[in-house]
Image (cartoon, rainbow, N blue to C red):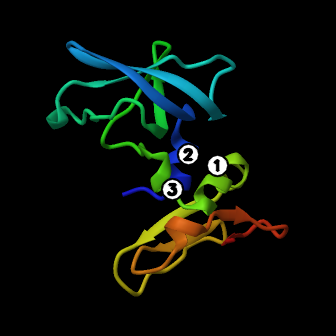
Amino acid sequence: MLHPQQAFCNADVVIMAKVVGVNVGSNTKYDIQQIKMFKGPDRVIHAIFTASSPAACGVTLETNKEYLFIGKLVTGRMYATQCGYNMPWEDLSATQKKCLTRRYQSGCNCKIIRCTSLPCPISTPEECLWMDLGTDNGQNLACIKRRDGSCAWK
């Protein structure tokens, strides 16, 4: 599981879009209406492609619903997978929506280390420890570089 900031930093494209149509074939093509681009090329994305089968990490989306899509460009096409970070826009916290505009990008030089059981050491000052154990780091915080070069949750 990735922290949303990690997904943002690793992605080629991060957009908010509404699904307006679907065509199923060897790959499923979702026609979208791009609402906002947070990261990506200087062009409008009109479609999202995914594997037709959930077993192949394909995603199933609802038409007339707005989503946050975080994905890769492959030969000019945007692809979304279950292994990626795609979710209904309404499921994002207000802070996550705000972080998409600048905070996540400003923390891409920091490294988020996931901690699933204690103790969890930090090996460099550029790391933020993500303790996904009932904390709100995933929902409400971003790992940001401070003036001294170290990184911290803010």
- In the picture, the disc for residue 100 is 1
- Number of the label disc, if any, that sits on residue 92: 3
Pinpoint residue 75: horizontal percent, then vertical percent.
Answer: 46, 13
Instruction: From the image, state whether disc 2 or disc 1 is nearer to you.
Output: 1
Looking at the image, residue 52 sits to the left or right of residue 43; the answer is: left
Q: Quadrant of residue 24?
A: top left
Q: Nearer the viewer, residue 15 or 79?
A: 15
Residue kind at label 3, given as amino acid type: Leu
Residue at 47 percent across and 22 percent down: it is: 32
Label pair 2/1, CB-CB below 8 angstroms: yes
Residue occupying the point 27% across, 35% down: 60
Residue type at mark 1 is Leu
Residue 30 image-quadrant placement: top left
Q: Label 1's element?
A: helix
Give percent across and percent down for residue 67: 46, 40
Left or right, residue 39 beside residue 88: right
Task: Say whether disc 3 or disc 1 marks the residue closer to the N-terminus.
Answer: 3
Q: Residues within 10 Å of mark 2 (few under 14, many from 20)?
A: many
User: First in sequence: mark 2 or mark 3?
Assistant: 2
Instruction: Categorize mark 1 by other alpha carbons within 10 Å: few (<14), some (14-19), many (20+).
Output: many
Amino acid marked by disc 2? Phe
Q: Which residue is mark 2?
A: 8
